[in-house]
Amino acid sequence: MINSIVILKSKQQWNHFLINKIKLFFNLEVFFLNENLNLSLKEIKIKLNNIILNRNIEIAFFEGDYLSFINYEFINDIKIKKKILCLTDDFDMHEVNHITARSCDGILTSCPISNLRFEEKGLLSFYSPLQADGTTHKKIKAKKKYDVLFFGAYKADRKNYIDYLIKNKIKIKIIRSDRVWTINDEDLSRLICESKIVLNFSNQGLKNKHYAYKSVKQNYYLLKDRIFISGLCGTLCLSEFAPAQKLLFHSRELPTFKSKEELLKKILLLLLKKRILKKITLEFCKKVKQYENKRHFKKISLDIINLTNNQKPKIQLPYWYEKIFNRKRINLYSKTGNLIIFLKDVFENIINRIKNISVINILLIVETFILTILLSPRVIFKNKTKYNN
């Protein structure tokens, strides 16, 4: 197998889904940026390039989406044959992601609509659901103890739906995870197998994240991995409508709802008509298996291996893009409590911009000076707190 590396921002509960997916078809090194904040960003890049060179690594997978050190310039400075940007929340980060993606050879996104948006811009993109691991989530023989199961956070209008079901005497098992996931994969799989229906919500609630322009708050209806987890465990998922679902499932394979009343009506029908529930469950699970990692990601991995490493023209980055990542870089180092590294990285940042002087870099140098003065007390305070503890 070809040697590869995945560069992640920090250790998170969901990291293993991406790691395990890549490990199926590549020898994989894992590099966490937050574990290397004793180094300046320049030193982190040098360390990464040395790892890649010494271990003969050919492909790098970069965690994208929300702001970190990983941006267009960071990826450009990593010396490796092939670069893949990995995305899970492109719905509200696309204006950032599509710029970062231009430093890569391909994009791996967990949303089929996101996949089409990148293709629309002439960028090579692959769709693969994040949580489609048939070894982590699988069907086991279990008695169906629960009519309806919901696991996840109470965001958007989910509580209103669930309260409505409870009011109408629907027996629903609830596993809440508003901030921290409190159940392991094995126990979750068992609960799904013990349920007749898994309830999925698509509405993310009002969002107004923006960088390049101002935007009004709006709801997003997203394809959720809860659908794939349920199907791999052999249980039907009844999902709130999301446009991306239409790209993957026929209406007979994934039943959907758009209102509390429609949801209640469909649950009652499925619980009453066991034959209908069984038939739809079989069709749904059969379709979900097509997206399981060993089957679906296998072809993508071959496409990545066979990618031609074309020379990518360097682009002029917009000021807003450079500004948000420059601020994030300074902010991340200010949180370390290491004044020496904080100032060292600021110095290297400014020197690099002086070497490539432009109107944008002059503005960023000025802002860097201001932020350094404002944030230095925070670094000193954090350092004293760590020392006292």
Image: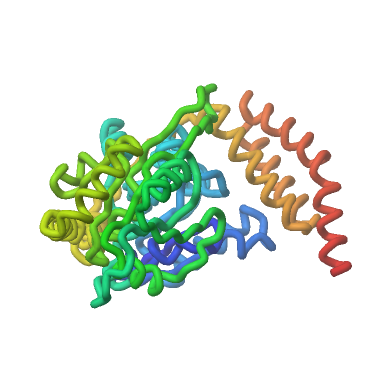
Q: Position of residue 387 (x, y in %)?
A: 86, 67
**Observer able to see residue 234:** yes
In which quadrant of the rendered view does residue 97 lie? top left
Residue located at (86% from left, 54% from top): 381
Up-down relation of residue 9 to residue 116 (above or below): below
**Observer able to see residue 305:** no
Up-down relation of residue 375 to residue 282 (above or below): above
User: In the figure, is residue 119 to the left or right of 38?
Assistant: left
Q: Quadrant of the N terminus?
A: bottom left
Nearer the observer, 182 or 346: 182
User: In the figure, is residue 67 to the left or right of 106?
Assistant: right
In which quadrant of the rendered view does residue 383 lie? bottom right
Q: Position of residue 209 (x, y in %)?
A: 53, 33
User: In the figure, is residue 267 to the left or right of 79?
Assistant: left
Residue located at (45% from left, 46% from top): 163
Q: Position of residue 228 (x, y in %)?
A: 28, 57
Residue sitting at the far bottom? 141
The colour style of the image is rainbow
Residue located at (87% from left, 61% from top): 384
Q: Position of residue 326 (x, y in %)?
A: 63, 39
Q: Quadrant of the C terminus?
A: bottom right
The number of callouts visible is: 0
Residue located at (24% from left, 77% from top): 141
User: In the figure, is residue 278 to the left or right of 138?
Assistant: left
